Amino acid sequence: MTFLSGDVHYSTASEVQRATGSRIVQAVCSPIRNPLPIIMRSFSAVLAYTIATRLTALLARSAGVTSPSFHWAGVKGPWFDNCLANLEDTPAGLVLKWEKGVVSNGDHGHPLVEQVATVTVAPRK
């Protein structure tokens, strides 16, 4: 199962960590947006993967919410480029690709496409 989402101002891929059952992957792409300043990129990355996870777990415990039986782990990312993502169903599995436009030699009329990342979600055997 793959969830597609966006609107977090960066792109990433995460997966539920568990030993059995189907794979659960979240692919995020926040395309064509105003770039975040470097300090905000760093702040967002730290919040997304460390402080926010611990803080929300603490708040949930204090409210009496039981811990989930699984947790999410980063697969790749985050990337802060203006990316477009595509998914392709292949014999090897679901291939997720993030790409960005790049202006070469100041030629804004003919931007190039550059691959940012690729993740293959292969079925479990």
Image (cartoon, rainbow, N blue to C red):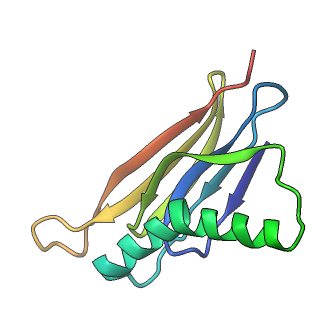
User: Going 42% across and 55% down the picture, which residue do you hit?
Assistant: 99
Residue sitting nearer the eye, 125 or 111: 125
Query: Could you tell whether 52 is left or right of 19 in the image?
Result: left
x and y, in percent, of residue 29 in the image: 56, 63
Residue sitting nearer the eye, 111 or 59: 59
x and y, in percent, of residue 102 in the image: 27, 64
User: Going 34% across and 64% down the picture, which residue do you hit?
Assistant: 101
User: Going 54% across and 70% down the picture, which residue do you hit?
Assistant: 30
User: Going 63% across and 70% down the picture, which residue do you hit?
Assistant: 55
Q: Vertical placement of 73 versus 43: above or below?
A: above
Q: Vertical placement of 12 versus 45: above or below?
A: above
Pick the quarter of the image with the C terminus.
top right
Looking at this rendering, what residue extends furthest in the front direction? 62
Q: Determine the image quadrant of residue 63.
A: bottom right
Query: Could you tell whether 72 is left or right of 113 in the image?
Result: right
x and y, in percent, of residue 98 in the image: 47, 53
